[in-house]
Image: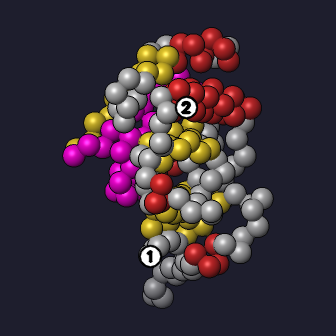
Amino acid sequence: MAPALQLQTETITLEQYETIPEEKRIEVFDGITYDMASPSQLHQAISMELSNIFYNYIKSNNGTCKLFTAPFDVKLSDKPLTIVQPDIMVICDPKKLDEKRCNGAPDFIIEIVSPSNPEDDYIRKLYYYKNHGVREYWIVDPQRKIVTVNYFDGHMVSVQYPFYSVIKVNIYDNLFVDFSEITKLLNI
């Protein structure tokens, strides 16, 4: 009996990644590329509302952290290459930023779940974000109407909130996100 054929997937380097056209949205996990779907209208609307909340908070508190939204590259690892494009991120260490990307883990990330691939946010990205030093990771799931807050401070704390909740942002002392306001605005 012949041995089973194993699919060999070639990994890419940073140099190869940088030759990919900007309009092609991909992420790289351990050197393997994965196509990203275009976000839906609801996804974009939630992203805009949450981005505004964080932007206004940082600005009104004269904060030094920077807010970025997708598509913006975050290189979590060189070898093997791991590059993600979180929906929303807050980066507090200016040394991690260059003109192309964030090099290292953001302090805070929000991913808005795509109905076509929810396990990507709940499993794969949770694993990578936790293991590469993200301090706090929110998974916003419009289909299930829940927000999962993962806080990695020494040990992992994971709490799920319904969409009508007021949720504290753990990386800040006094920032709370009122999801009932967002759901009212967006008619969710």
Q: Which mark is residue 13?
A: none
Residue carrying label 2: 59
Q: State yes or no: residue 144 in magenta.
A: yes
**Mark-to-mark CA distance, 2 and 1:** 36 Å
Which residues make up the magenta segment?
127-154
Comparing 180 with 40, the one in front is: 180
At x 53%, y 13%, the residue is 180
Would you say residue 46 is visible in this rendering?
no
Say which label, 2 or 1, has the lower sequence index.
2
Q: Amino acid at mark 1?
A: Lys
Looking at the figure, which quarter contains the N terminus? Answer: bottom left
Q: Report the colour scheme.
A: secondary structure
Res. 114 image quadrant = top right
Is disc 1 surrounded by few (<14), some (14 to 19) or many (20+) residues within 10 Å? few
At x 38%, y 31%, the residue is 172
Question: Residue 165's x, y, as percent?
Answer: 44, 15
At x 49%, y 33%, the residue is 62
Residue carrying label 1: 79
Nearer to us of marks 2 and 1 is: 2
